[in-house]
Amino acid sequence: MPQFKPESYTTVSPYLIADNAAATIEFLKQAFGAIELRRFAGNDGRLMHAEVRIDDSVLMLADVKDVDSTYGKALELGAVSVQEPVKKDDEDKRGGIRDSGGTTWWIATRME
């Protein structure tokens, strides 16, 4: 089984949703010395996903060992589906759920 998260990433990593993610990344670089790791832009120029490292932490989506199992368990516990786990154009299979408190969690497993 492949490593469930990239080497040197923490198990839980915050995922920020911003009105202007590119501007937020620039702020994080200037204010906190963030280093940009990955950036995926959509056809409209908006960022679909990006990752930055600040010291020993990565701001991104949360990786889990088995996205399908975690997604299923979350639904059993009352979460609502935001997106079923799917593999798109990068190495991650990801999906999203919203918990009873209204927090949206994006979960992913690195598929290599």
Image (spheres, grey):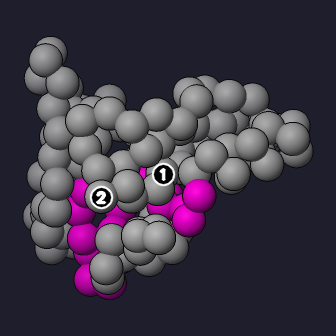
Does the rendering let one see residue 103? no
Displayed quadrant of residue 38: bottom left
One can see residue 112 in this view: yes
State the image coordinates of residue 10 (x, y, percent, origin top left). Answer: 44, 77
Image quadrant containing the C terminus: bottom left
In the rendered image, residue 32, in percent from the top left (x then y), is placed at 22, 72
What is the spatial separation of the Cα atoms under label 2 and label 1, in whole angstroms? Answer: 12 Å
Marking on residue 46: none
Residue matched to label 1: 108
Please name whichever residue, 69 or 24, is drawn nearer the observer in this view of the structure: 69
Image: magenta residue range:
51-66
Task: Give me the residue at 46% from left, 56% from top.
Answer: 109
14 w.r.t. 79: above or below: below
Name the residue type under label 1.
Ala
Does residue 63 appear to the left or right of 98 in the view shown?
A: left
Residue 83 position, x and y percent, is 56, 27
Helix, strand or loop for disc 2: loop
Q: Residue at x 24, y 36 (%)?
A: 89
- Of all residues, the one furthest to the front in this rendering is 1
SS type, badge 1: strand
Look at the image and say whether residue 64 sits in the magenta stretch. yes
Left or right: residue 103 versus residue 80 is left
Where's residue 9, x and y in %? Answer: 36, 76
Name the disc covering residue 112, or none.
Answer: 2
Say few, some or many: other residues with alpha carbon within 10 Å of mark 2 (under 14 / 14 to 19 / 20 or more). Answer: few
Residue at x-position 31% and y-position 79%: 7
